[in-house]
Amino acid sequence: MLTRIDHIGIACFDLDKTVEFYRATYGFEVYHSEVNEEQGVREAMLKINDTGDGGASYLQLLEPTREDSTVAKWLAKNGEGVHHIAFGTADVDGDAADIKAKGVRVLYEEPRIGSMGSRITFLHPKDCGGVLTELVTSADPGAAH
Ligand code: V0V
Ligand code: CO
């Protein structure tokens, strides 16, 4: 069951500059940052609020680490902006299977590693009304993140 907005992914050319915009404009601080080489991104998670299921909601700021990454390709075509939305679930495997059975393309056969050790998969934007959609199970769904 999808129980929260886990994050909104925002693609940018310059992560440090974008982090500074969110800090100066809204007062949001970086909760966690990392490089995910498989996904080709350097990212910063800004925690917005805790949620009723023991998780949290974040903004995920994404800067590409290489030119052939999905985010670099998207930025070249669209410029900066909202890249994907992510729903949180305690069971990414089960929810992905259920959604696949409804005819929506799930991009990975097995979930991959996402931010903060989470397990993630994606649904094809062309099957989701133009919205790239991610499903996330936190490393510890009972913990604060
Ligand atoms: C592409 N399209 C999108 C899109 N990216 N539509 C909405 N939102 C997006 N973000 C559209 C694009 O405009 C094309 O439409 C069509 O899909 C095919 O796109 P393409 O440019 O030819 O690119 P593809 O097919 O090579 O790749 C698209 C997919 C790719 C969605 C398959 O981006 C992908 O595998 N994404 C999942 C991984 C990812 O995005 N990782 C970065 C975040 P037209 O022109 O044909 O109409 S990593 C992350 O979130 C982490 C680590 C985390 O949360 O922990
Ligand atoms: Co994401």
Image (cartoon, rainbow, N blue to C red):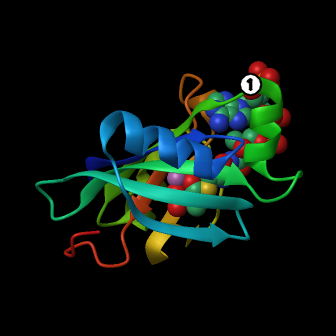
Q: Position of residue 43 (x, y in %)?
A: 58, 59
Q: Position of residue 46 (x, y in %)?
A: 38, 53
Q: Is mark 1 within 8 Å of ligand 1?
A: yes
Q: Position of residue 75 (x, y in %)?
A: 75, 35
Q: Does dot 1 land on a helix, a strand or a loop? A: helix
* 81 left or right of 39 in image: left
Give the amino acid type for the residue marked by disc 1 in the picture: Asn
Ligand 1, what quadrant?
top right
Q: Is residue 132 visible?
A: yes
Q: Is residue 110 visible?
A: no
Q: Position of residue 137 (x, y in %)?
A: 38, 66
Residue pictured at 82% horizontal, 40% vertical: 73
- Mark 1 burial class by Cα count in 10 Å: few <14, some 14-19, many 20+: few
* 41 left or right of 119 in image: right
Q: Which residue is mark 1?
A: 78
Residue pictured at 21% horizontal, 75% vertical: 143
Placement of the C terminus among the 4 image quadrants: bottom left
The answer to whether residue 109 is above or below residue 6 is below
Residue pictured at 50% horizontal, 45% vertical: 20
